[in-house]
Amino acid sequence: MTKVTQPLTIEYMNEILYTRAEEVFLLCMLITRRGLAHAFCDFSGHVSLFTSRVTPIDSEYASGKFADIAKIFTWVDMSNQAFPESTFEKSLAEMDTYISYLDYIVARNEPVTTSNMAA
């Protein structure tokens, strides 16, 4: 992940977080398309809330037999945050960790099932 090199303005923080959200979306599409897991993304534009989760490829949603492999729930717009710089640092760290895990799923290139999700 890139390091922040410019002064942190609200606009710059937002740009970084939106770019990370786009990366998560693309990785989720890749993971789902390759049949490695079920990857979900949601962006609530009216409040700038970004969520994503990944579940095993053999999840049985109707029976409730599924568990999240990974998930994230974060803000991507710092304009309305009481402490934008600390909120930004927390969001950025969470997104970087989440992206690293999605990259790991892609690199591993094996379907994640309920029986091997701890592997």
Image: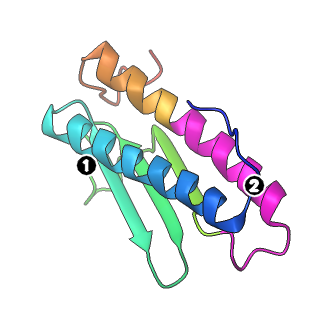
Number of other residues with Cα within 10 Å of mark 2, as a class: few under 14, some 14 to 19, many 20 or more: few
Going by the image, does 58 lie left or right of 39?
left
Taking the spot 30% from the left edge, 24% from the top edge, the residue there is 106
Q: Quadrant of the N terminus?
A: top right
For badge 2, the amino acid type reads: Leu
Tell us which disc is closer to us: 2 or 1.
2
For badge 1, the amino acid type reads: Glu
Q: Is residue 119 above or below residue 76?
A: above
Going by the image, does 28 lie left or right of 100?
left
Q: Give coordinates of residue 71: x percent, y percent.
A: 51, 47
Q: Is residue 38 above or below residue 99?
A: below
93 in magenta: yes
Taking the spot 60% from the left edge, 69% from the top edge, the residue there is 77
**Disc 2 on helix, strand or loop?**
loop
Labelled pair 2, 1 in contact (Cβ < 8 Å): no
Q: Give coordinates of residue 22: x percent, y percent.
A: 38, 52
Q: Give coordinates of residue 103: x percent, y percent.
A: 40, 26
Residue bearing the label numbered 1: 60
Residue bearing the label numbered 2: 8
Name the quadrant containing residue 24. Answer: top left
Q: Magenta residues, as a range?
A: 78-98
66 in magenta: no
Q: Is residue 94 above or below residue 48?
A: above
Can residue 34 be seen from the camera position used here? Answer: yes
